[in-house]
Image (cartoon, rainbow, N blue to C red):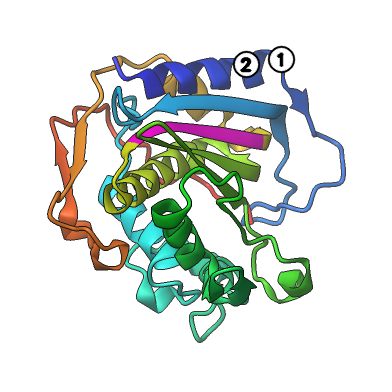
Amino acid sequence: MSKADVLFVDMCRGILDHGFSTEGAQVRARWEDGSPAYTIKNFGVVNRYDLSEEFPALTLRPTAIKSAMDEILWIWQRKSNNIHDLKPHIWDEWADPDGSIGKAYGYQMARKYRFGQGEMDQVDNVLWQLKNAPQSRRIMTNIYNFDDLSEMNLEPCAYSMTFNVTGNRLNAILNQRSQDILAANNWNVVQYALLVMMFAQVSGFVPGELIHVIADAHIYNRHVPVIRELIERPQYPAPMVTLNPKVNDFYEFTTDDLIVENYQAGPQVKNIPIAV
């Protein structure tokens, strides 16, 4: 069975059995019909995925790994904040008529800052440090820019990455302020696992641990029956996921360089209501 399945099931059971219900509280999120989107939540959930052991894709239901890679490249490589540059339609509800999501995600990654080695954006700074100062404890990114929050159509959920080299392993911590567990959990885990794999490959390391820290891990009230059914499903071995070994420049990766083999999973969960 996939270790990602085990972590997911344990996390969901922890929320359902011991979580705090926001029912009756003032909440921002709304369902399409305008009613409040209440949640059951746990604070400070931490999941660890060892990428050297297996790729952390759920098998309870399939995760669209290639689409997840396209979104992470949209943010970190193309550094775009326009949905016209993205194949999946996951951002459509937050885009304006021109396709922009405001000064969020890719916009923040494209901003130039003055680092010790010169002016560059956060992605290029990470890549430079991994190649030139891999023992640094300052290999970080942060896109929760308070100056621009009012001009973001959605404030970043996954907002910070910290990279750390231990021996020949590239490890990373993903910090997330909030997560819709049904809609987004494994999607985010998969895409940031791929990011670590890409950064490791182009910097001469092997993928190590991805640690996912979620401040507010929640299940929406209308998702509870789906989650209860999902976590009782059969589990299968993790798929084999690799990258084209010929790519040695992060900016040359495309989704065609993703190789997914032996991915067995349960049926997809369709028509998930999304709170906005």
Q: Which mark is residue 227?
A: none
Taking the magenta stretch, the answer to whether it contains residue 109 is: no
Magenta residues, as a range?
A: 207-214
User: What residue would you read off at disc 1?
Assistant: 18
- Left or right relative to 154: residue 253: left
Which amino acid type corresponds to the residue marked 2 in the rendered image?
Gly
Taking the magenta stretch, the answer to whether it contains residue 209 is: yes
Disc 2 packing (10 Å; few <14; some 14–19; many ≥20):
some
Residue furthest to the bottom in view is 98
- At which x and y percent is residue 152? 67, 71
Quadrant that contains the C terminus: bottom right
| Separation of residues labelled 1 and 2 (CA atoms) | 6 Å
Residue occupying image coordinates x 77% and y 28%: 21
Residue occupying image coordinates x 54% and y 26%: 47
Residue nearest the observer in this picture, 3 or 108? 108
Callouts 1 and 2 close, C-beta under 8 Å: yes
- Left or right relative to 25: residue 84: left
User: What residue would you read off at disc 2?
Assistant: 14
In the image, is residue 274 above or below residue 95? above
